[in-house]
Image (spheres, grey):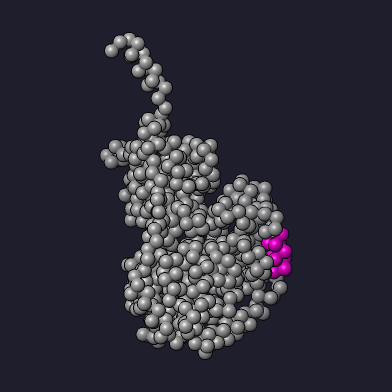
Amino acid sequence: MSAVAQRVDAEVAVEQELTDGFHLVIDALKLNGIETIYGVPGIPITDLGRMCQAEGIRVISFRHEQNAGNAAAIAGFITKKPGICLTVSAPGFLNGLTALANATTNCFPMILISGSSEREIVDLQQGDYEEMDQLAIAKPLCKAAFRVLHAADIGIGVARAIRAAVSGRPGGVYLDLPAKLFSQVMDAAAGEKSLVKVIDAAPEQIPGAAAVDRAIELLKSAKRPLIVLGKGAAYAQADDAIRALVEKSGIPFLPMSMAKGLLPDTHPQSAGAARSTALKDSDVVLLLGARLNWLLSHGKGKTWGEPGSKKFIQVDIEPKEMDSNVEIAAPLVGDIGSVVNALLARIDGNWTPAPADWVESIRSKKEANIAKMAPKLLKNSAPMDFHSALGALKNVIKERPDAMLVNEGANTLDLARGIIDMYQPRKRLDVGTWGVMGIGMGFAIAAAVETGKPVLAVEGDSAFGFSGMEVETICRYNLPVCIVIFNNNGIYRGLDTDPTGRDPGTTVFVKNARYDKMMEAFGGEGVNVTTPDELYRAVSAAMDSGKPTLINAEIDPAAGSESGNIGSLNPQSVVKKK
């Protein structure tokens, strides 16, 4: 080869455009419509976060990975796109893993992306910085887990993670990116060709015609039919079809907590205020995106009346869910939207509505329970109890039906579920299937970021403690979040004592703590209230202003019951030490 030819080749090589792992990860996410990342910066993903921000992806940096993970998970529920959580290796990964497992249990699409140590050192257990076989640890706790070792595989790795997160029954996915991957360099044109845009990530799954016929015949035979709406129905975003099914069938419906608002809680067919009667006395139950887990007493026991008195129709995209606790007489396997539309096609002008005596029995029981509850909600005493405080917040949401409500705690959660009416779908976000504490601030931040709507986070004082430092994050990003802490000085109640007199009781916190001062420390608004009227005015002002606000609501320390409404799950010793 001549000297001239060699010089030309050298110049071409110098001018060749290159890319690297950092840019390929960003390009793969952007190609697939990812607009927001939640995470905590640090080795080895600090620069990845900076570069994502520079490339137009919004990056919300948290104070703890578990809270960032919870934000990503609920973002997935709200948007039907996988929420992305980005963490550092080992301890940071483990912090995010709790949220990933919770997302999988709740069927929220989420991808946890974590940097990790070098494979050759990890596999020989030679003691690398934050050494851990993260892929092996993640696999049992999520829907799928993948590792990318070569820059050319980043596109396919991101695509596989996205498809796994949203297809079929949604869930959590782990994507492991070793530190060495980010600095790998390759030809930019080849890198661009390696990217994959996921097509039809969550395809429709049409129910079988025979299965639809079986369900319709069972509904036609029902004397006391009931529809139970679960959060899967809310996630499906088939709102109009679900409403048409309920209204055209005339069947009373019972929403689980995160399905509240699919139809307004004030809808005439709502059985929410007559839950016990509806479950016990119904004879045919259509489960729409709801599972017969502990939240529905596994479909058996005294909650469901006489043994063998129920026939279940279950709609779920996961075939293995059928018969998980009791026999399902009419399984309908498919996505919610397709199944509901198939049922609607069979409910025509000749459909006989649910029997009037059954509808009337639900209505009368509901009205009696609402009337019985009303005086408790109207009290304006100091200190407040849970009912009077929630009565004030019930009015706040009634006046702002498009606001987002986040709720966690024991008594704070249990009572709010029944007291605060919801009017629009996917507005109520709470602890879900596992009943975990600590979702509050992560959910609140994601709700504000993803929807732009004002957020009301109603927190027990114990629940708030799990994620409370994120008030700084809320202030840093100037998010329209109003946090109300029901402060009764402890877990369940603030009256427990140490029999030895040495320490505070195990469930007791600092007496008369002022959580509102925390928010003021970071530039937000802090308010202390002692009556329902003060609470209503303070929350209304905060929701209208859009300013980060924390309201410390003083609740009677004697208010509340042990473990809330699930005290039966908390074993008690019956043996006295001699």
Q: Residue furthest front?
A: 349
Say whether residue 342 is visible: yes
Q: Quadrant of residue 43?
A: top left
Q: Is residue 53 magenta?
A: no
The magenta stretch spans which residues? 531-541
Q: Which quadrant is home to the N terminus?
A: top left
| Residue 367 vertical position relative to residue 139 in the rendered view, above or below | below
Nearer to me, 319 or 355: 355
Residue beneath the point at 67% across and 54% down: 546
Nearer to me, 34 or 486: 34
| Residue 562 vertical position relative to residue 159 in the rendered view, above or below | below
Q: Left of 172 or right of it: where is 123? A: left
Main secondary structure found in the magenta portion: helix
Nearer to me, 538 or 395: 395
Residue 37, image x, y percentages? 50, 46
Residue beneath the point at 67% across and 79% down: 375
Q: Quadrant of residue 45?
A: top left
Residue 438, image x, y percentages? 51, 58
Residue beneath the point at 52% across and 38% down: 55
Q: Quadrant of residue 206?
A: bottom left
